[in-house]
Image (cartoon, rainbow, N blue to C red):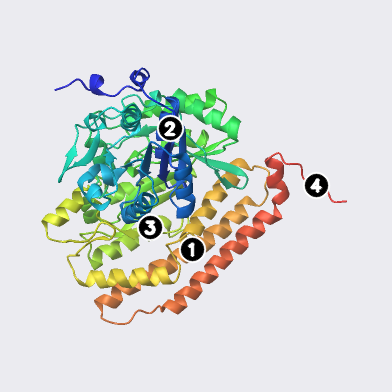
Amino acid sequence: MPDLLNVCSDFGNTLARPRDTTRPVVLVGFKRQGNLGLGYLASTLRARGYPVEILDFEDPYEKIRDAVLRAQPVLVGFSLIFQFYIFRFEELMRHLRADGVSAHFTMGGHFPSLSHEHALELAPQLDSVVRFEGELTLLELVDCLTTGQDWRSIQGIAYRQSNYIVATPMRALVHDLDELPYPDRAIQPHIILGRPVMQMLASRGCARTCSFCSIHMFYRSAPGKVVRTRRPAEIACEMKMLHEERGISLFLFQDDDFPVFGPAWHRWTREFLAELYRQDLPGRILWKINARADAIDPELFAEMRDAGMYLVYMGLESGSEEGLVTLNKSITVQQNIRAVDSLKKLGILFDFGFMLLDPSSTFESILENVAFLRRIVGDGYMAAEFCRMIPYDGTPIKDQLAQQGRLRGDICHPDYDFLDPHLYDFYVAVNEMLNITGWIHGLQALSPQLKYAWSEFAVIERLFPSVPDVQAYKQTLRRITRQSNEVLFEVVEDLVYAFIEDRKPKYSQDALREECRVFVENLLDARNEYVLRNRSYFLKDLGVEVPQPA
């Protein structure tokens, strides 16, 4: 078996490789949420002298086309975050080819990495796929293209050859994340009450094996250590640099599973907290993490809260023991509840992922899930949201459903049969009811706006100490959230019993739409009134001189 330390690609060893940096590279992907994947690819290429332009996939085609034609790049790389967009990416590539773009086209991301044959089949304009972690593979690919070397022999790619697909030996995962340069962040940060927000990364990989998730499959399919952490001092230095140079006050860690589980990662986290204090950041910044419920340790999380952690996102996923087994969460309902109770006791805001329906669902398990949601957020601590489990490419549960003959749909609309055929009609009914009435899905829907209001409130509470009436505003938010959650729970429960009892549901779409409208109106009125009434306090805490009345 090869020594992984020797096969791991070393960024430092790429310095002496021949290259011609006169032609740029163009990267295309989603930029709205601060795409760190694109950022690391861009900074790695720039560190070796290549000009790089990052284009927003959501821009009009003409803008993307003109930028690519103007750049005349050696390569255009497409970052496919969500497999549902494969046909839109294919359409973009087709139009670029028709408009005379002859550059090498490559694509990276979870779907093309795990399903490279499918990706190359669905997007015939692609010359290659960069599989798994792409920084070093993309750099070598560009080096080969610019110097006329045979790029088909490098590790970590797939391509067409005649009538079949070739996948070269996989490149090892990056062993030392701190060798990579800080990611490009050529974006305008999102602002919450004057405080800029930026994404961060402390680690890569996930040690868990949830059946519905492609993330752990992405990191387990290539050789190398699955979970790697950056050095705490490096992270704190990057945060301080962003705070001082760009005024960033809010950091959203995008780690799939922030390293807080078990003694070794407890030590790592405490070292990270010590580095934050060493850089004098607590009290000046806030930060959010993603963590499993079984990793919520009250003592450690109290220390993290005091050092600026204000929000924890947990993938709770199910309130049914059978659902948790189906999803291979390796956790119990009671552990989920204990984590929620601990965060509430610590006064830490939490958000969560939840699947009302999964392949093992029954009407009884749906009622269990509603009861669980009522238990954790029936008090209005956070807005309730839920979805249905989707069988993504590369996941164990997709393979299992295929073996059972239950897999349905296509790459953009993956689907499956429920064990009870009536559940599909229920899913359609609840989905239509909540989508049409604007409750859960969409940026303007009620639940996302409530979640944003709570995140904003946490920022007010922690970073704007002079603003008065914080607790009164909190109680208003709590009341609106509690009441709207209860209506949501009642709607779902009523639909369940309507199917069981073969009757019409009590709620009509028109009535629910009106209730939703009133909740949104009350929320926005309360939020806007509070912020406007205390505008001078916010400006004062931001260091903005407040004009005095004449």
> How far apart are the two marked residues, 4 and 2, measured between alpha carbons?
51 Å
Label 2 sits on a secondary structure element that is loop
Residue shown at 51%/33% (left/top)? Answer: 307
Residue shown at 44%/44% (left/top)? Answer: 68
Query: Viewer-proximal residue, 448 or 328?
Result: 448
Query: Viewer-proximal residue, 210 or 191?
Result: 191
The quadrant in which the N terminus is found is top left
Answer with mark 2 or mark 1, whichever residue precedes in sequence. 2
* Amino acid found under the numbered disc labelled 1: Leu
Answer with mark 4 or mark 2, whichever residue precedes in sequence. 2
Residue located beneath label 1 in the image: 446
Q: Residue 399 location, x and y as percent? A: 16, 51
* Amino acid found under the numbered disc labelled 4: Pro
Outermost residue on the right side: it is: 550
Answer with mark 4 or mark 1, whichever residue precedes in sequence. 1
In this rendering, the label closer to the viewer, 3 or 2: 2
Residue shown at 58%/66% (left/top)? Answer: 522
Label 4 sits on a secondary structure element that is loop
Q: Residue 254 location, x and y as percent? A: 41, 40
Residue 47 occupies which quadrant of the picture? Answer: top left
Residue located beneath label 3 in the image: 375
Outermost residue on the bottom side: it is: 503
Residue located beneath label 4 in the image: 547
> How far apart are the two marked residues, 2 and 1, measured between alpha carbons?
47 Å
Residue located beneath label 2 in the image: 23
